[in-house]
């Protein structure tokens, strides 16, 4: 079994996939920034942002269901905002008693909570569309274009290349452990030895993963040297932006500013 | 993919824009300096070494062991990376891991990536470096010099990162400090034990197989007093500030409010003036309904257009 299922990229043919990765990255970041800057309680703007996100999902051919499934990964964190329901002061919607504590659900608390939840939901959808419609090499080009240091982009690129190699390595280690240390079929039974023993075995696996990483990086470095690497990261010059894509970028940015500006102009 | 067993990667929407921007402003120069320092130490080996180590840490986060009743211990890896490759390299490795997790796997947001880099890449690394090198001076054999410092620094890195997360959430007004700090610190004090045990296991394994990797001073040039002092100050600051903030949450929230961190949520500043967004609609509820209708029309239009585009090439092929 290989770990390539981790790669979220779906190679499809759609206008969203065809869009220049630089434009896509900048628009995604601007969209998330707009969502973050939208004040609490500006429901019409949230609705428009959400319908924008949904339209792009439809247009990308990824399918709304696919994007929503991936977006669900950010869901557990909503727990962190849950206390807002009860701690924000305001008129109580209803009270209830839990043990010693009395809770009062307030409408302003509900509004704040919904605001945080919807912001994070809309933002994560944009990030999912970006990751699923842009191949990683294209993302690296986009990162170079927005002036992320070249060396850092090169490290990201190399990391990505070996991510799946080490993912497979980790899966093999896990399988070897399962084969040797007697994993219980019944979850209630304790697998293997004591807790400290299990932790030590896992630590040994992590250690050997590191050893393999050190050795592999030596081999990769030699291979790079033998191909003429001299510490300088060379890459093709960025191709010029097509006018059509520049237009899309400008339209998108104007649209986002247009959505946001009433909130700030009318303060 | 969501490997982290407890909330540590903050998604977008949970931090106020001001907090996110400030943490970007702190993180970006640190990462830039780390790039320069590691470049000086490693030269042209930097790119392959850092890239591969980051991939290994990412994969290492998949390793787990069952604790009890369906819960499991995981590895974050900041302490192990710091001990094995030095603080500046570890900053780069953790930055790469956290960035790829956010960009590709939506584990953590993009706007708050600066905060996540700060929490896991900078706080985690600085604290584990300071703790490890402080305890390493203890007298004694391998256990005292390597394993115990390893355990404590790994545990401290997790708890310190969690405290940083909860302070940021509190300053943003997302979670009250009185709840966030004890909850995050409590949960991660337990999770940190798992991290510490795995780190000790890894260090014991490496000490037995490749002791040369653990020689003091092997991890490039000494990091200098600055990292040391920064790490200690950070640990001490978090240790002092957190109980203070959680026992006196009103203080923290008052400061946050005065500085304008907490978005002005208590009184909605957003007053739709109807003429502006939707001419002729004079009511906020109507504006919301109108926005809903516009949204539905937009999505339906795109569905129709997308169907049309997809049918286009096939029809012309026939």
Image (spheres, rainbow, N blue to C red):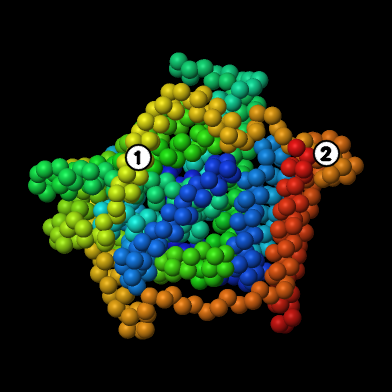
- Could you tell me which residue is drawn at 50 percent across and 25 percent down? B251
Label total for image: 2
Assign a secondary structure to mark 1: helix
Which comes sooner in the sequence, label 1 or label 2? 1
Assign a secondary structure to mark 2: loop
Say if residue B10 shows up in the picture: yes
x, y percent for residue B90: 34, 56
State the image quarter where residue A60 is shown: bottom right
x, y percent for residue A235: 49, 77
**Residue that protrudes farthest toward the front in the picture:** B225
x, y percent for residue B303: 73, 60
Q: Is residue B213 left or right of residue A222?
A: left
A71 versus B249 height, above or below: below
- Could you tell me which residue is drawn at 66 percent across and 49 percent down? A34
Do callouts 1 and 2 point to residues on the same chain?
Answer: yes
x, y percent for residue A124: 57, 51
Q: Of B95 and B87, which appears nearest the observer?
A: B87
- Could you tell me which residue is drawn at 35 percent across and 63 percent down? B38
Q: Of B89 and A142, which appears nearest the observer?
A: B89
Say if residue B52 shows up in the picture: no
State the image quarter where residue A209 is shown: bottom left
State the image quarter where residue A174 is shown: bottom left
**Residue that protrudes farthest toward the left in the picture:** B141
- In which quadrant of the rendered image does the C terminus of chain B lie? bottom right
- According to the image, label 1 marks what residue? B233
- According to the image, label 2 marks what residue? B273
Foreground disc of the pair 1, 2 = 1
Q: Of B151 and A110, which appears nearest the observer?
A: B151
Cα–Cα gap, marks 1 and 2? 49 Å
């Amino acid at each position: 079994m290989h770990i390539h299922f981790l790669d979220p990229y779906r190679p499809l043919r759609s206008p969203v996939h065809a869009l220049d990765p630089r434009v896509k990255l900048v628009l995604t970041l601007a969209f998330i920034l707009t969502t973050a800057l939208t004040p609490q309680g500006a429901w019409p703007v949230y609705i428009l942002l959400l319908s924008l996100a949904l339209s792009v999902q439809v247009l990308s051919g990824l399918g709304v269901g696919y994007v929503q499934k991936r977006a669900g990964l950010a869901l557990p964190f909503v727990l962190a905002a849950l206390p807002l329901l009860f701690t924000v002061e305001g008129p109580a919607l209803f009270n209830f008693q839990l043990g010693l504590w009395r809770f009062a659900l307030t409408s302003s608390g509900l509004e704040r909570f919904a605001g945080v939840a919807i912001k994070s939901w809309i933002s994560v959808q944009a990030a999912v569309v970006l990751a699923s419609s842009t191949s990683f090499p294209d993302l690296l080009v986009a990162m170079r274009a927005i002036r992320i240091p070249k060396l850092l982009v090169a490290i990201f690129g190399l990391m990505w290349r070996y991510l799946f190699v080490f993912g497979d390595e980790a899966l093999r280690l896990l399988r070897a452990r399962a084969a040797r240390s007697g994993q219980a079929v019944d979850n209630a039974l304790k697998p293997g030895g004591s807790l400290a023993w299990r932790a030590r075995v896992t630590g040994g696996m992590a250690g050997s993963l590191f050893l393999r990483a050190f050795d592999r990086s030596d081999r990769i470095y030699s291979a790079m040297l033998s191909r003429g690497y001299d510490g300088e990261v060379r890459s093709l010059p960025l191709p010029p932006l097509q006018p059509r894509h520049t237009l899309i970028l400008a339209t998108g940015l104007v649209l986002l500013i247009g959505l946001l500006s009433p909130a700030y102009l009318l303060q | 993919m969501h490997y982290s067993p407890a909330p540590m990667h903050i998604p977008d929407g949970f931090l106020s824009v001001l907090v996110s921007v400030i943490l970007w402003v702190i993180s970006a120069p640190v990462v830039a300096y780390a790039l320069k320092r590691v470049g000086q130490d490693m030269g042209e080996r930097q790119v392959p070494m850092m890239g591969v180590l980051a991939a290994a840490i990412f994969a290492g986060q998949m390793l787990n062991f069952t604790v009890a009743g369906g819960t499991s211990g995981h590895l974050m890896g900041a302490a192990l990376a710091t001990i094995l490759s030095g603080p500046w390299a570890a900053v780069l490795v953790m930055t790469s891991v956290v960035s790829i997790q956010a960009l590709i796997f939506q584990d953590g947001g993009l706007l708050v990536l600066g905060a996540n880099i700060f929490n896991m890449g900078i706080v985690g690394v600085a604290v584990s470096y300071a703790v490890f090198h402080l305890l390493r001076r203890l007298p004694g054999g391998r256990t005292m010099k390597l394993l115990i410092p390893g355990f404590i620094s790994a545990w401290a890195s997790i708890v310190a990162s969690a405290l940083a997360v909860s302070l940021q959430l509190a300053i943003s007004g997302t979670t009250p400090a009185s709840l966030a700090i004890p909850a995050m610190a409590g949960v991660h004090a337990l999770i940190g034990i798992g991290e510490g045990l795995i780190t000790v296991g890894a260090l014991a394994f490496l000490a037995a197989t490749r002791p040369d990797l653990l020689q003091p001073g092997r991890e490039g040039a000494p990091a200098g007093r600055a990292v040391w002092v920064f790490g200690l100050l950070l640990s001490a600051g978090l240790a002092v500030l957190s109980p203070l903030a959680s026992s006196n949450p009103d203080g923290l929230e008052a400061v946050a409010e005065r500085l304008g961190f907490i978005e002005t949520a208590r009184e909605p500043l957003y007053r739709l003036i109807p003429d502006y967004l939707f001419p002729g609609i004079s009511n906020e509820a109507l504006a919301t309904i109108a926005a809903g209708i516009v949204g539905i029309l937009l999505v339906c239009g795109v569905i129709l257009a997308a169907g049309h585009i997809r049918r286009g090439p096939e029809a012309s092929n026939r």
